[in-house]
Amino acid sequence: MTDSFLARVQDAYRQVQNEQVAALEAFDGRLETVRDTWDRPEGGGGDTRILRNGRVIEKGGLNFSAVQGAVSPGLKQQMNTEAERFAATGVSSVLHPHNPHVPIIHMNVRYFSLDDGTWWFGGGIDLTPHYVVADEARAFHADLKAVCDRHAVADHPAFKAWADRYFYSPHRGESRGVGGIFFDYVGRDGDVDREAALAFCVDLASQYAAVYRRRAEAFVDHPVTEDERRWQGLRRGRYVEFNLVHDRGTRFGLVSGGRTESILMSLPARAEWAYDHQPAEGSREAQTLAILRRGEAGTDWLGEG
């Protein structure tokens, strides 16, 4: 599939990857960055950047991919389409910190097109604190609202509500974290200008390192107890469950013949599971769990609801 707009999206997303990796390296100061460029036999390839063993980041990555190929029967069923070929390009990242007082963060922006002329953008940023700090959650949501407010194609209340519904684990009755924004199929119905949608996605992804730095820098050197470390492991376990059971991006990558190592980059280096773990009443762990169990509607952090 040759498409000049697709090539421009790919160039823009490559630039985002390079700039955001450089910004994270500068902030962390001790990151070990491993680069793995790869080709996909069916078409396209990617650039995986593994970020590990830093001052802030224990394990994470910031990946670029641009792939294309035949729409498999499984993919046709998942997307409800009769198109024969697809092209997809995106930048995605997950960062797992050393310190449990620093949150996990996820970012993804993507562009998808089919040979029947259908196209759309999707993506978002969301935050998964091991311990929910209300002021930090509000500041994070304010950062994302500021980006949305710069772009007519971005509906912050709708995208925030979509994130609350999406990043929810029904089998646990818990939100994965404090949400953020999530959007998909932007432009699929022909009601959005492609240039405007691309500008929004690039702006959002370009804020990633700065947004994370603001959430992390006050907590990087916070003292940590063994109980807090164990709680971090348990919350990481919940993160793993969501990604493997519910995350559409993970499922799409696997059913479309994606590169498993890059897809599962989102998983932490270590995680824990404990049978029927119940935090002590009144503890910070119990308070965090109470917030995460408010249901799919999430928390109205900015008073918009």
Image (spheres, helix red, strand yellow):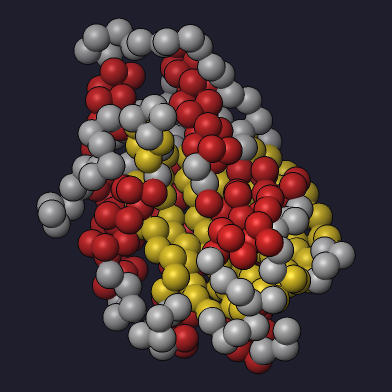
Give the residue at x 49% y 76%: 120
User: What is the count of numbered marks?
Assistant: 0
Q: Is residue 96 visible?
A: no
Q: Nearer the viewer, residue 30 or 61?
A: 61
Q: Position of residue 303 (x, y in %)?
A: 12, 52
Q: Is residue 166 visible?
A: yes
Name which quarter of the figure residue 142 lies in: bottom left
The spot of residue 60 in percent (x, y) is 62, 43
Kindly identify the residue that appears in the image at 63 percent across and 77 percent down: 83
Residue 13 found in image quarter: bottom right
Q: Is residue 50 left or right of residue 210?
A: right
- On screen, 106 above or below 156? above
Q: Quadrant of the N terminus?
A: bottom right
Q: Is residue 60 left or right of residue 103?
A: right
Tell me the residue at 75%/46% (across/down).
Answer: 261
The one nearer the camera, 187 or 23, is: 187
Q: In screen coordinates, is 233 left or right of 147?
A: right
Displayed quadrant of residue 58: top right
Q: Is residue 237 left or right of residue 67?
A: left
Q: Residue furthest bottom?
A: 4
Report x, y in % for residue 296.
28, 42
Image quadrant where one finds the C terminus: bottom left
Residue shown at the point (49%, 37%) measured from the top left: 242
Is 209 situated above or below 57?
below
Q: Residue 180 location, x and y as percent?
A: 35, 52
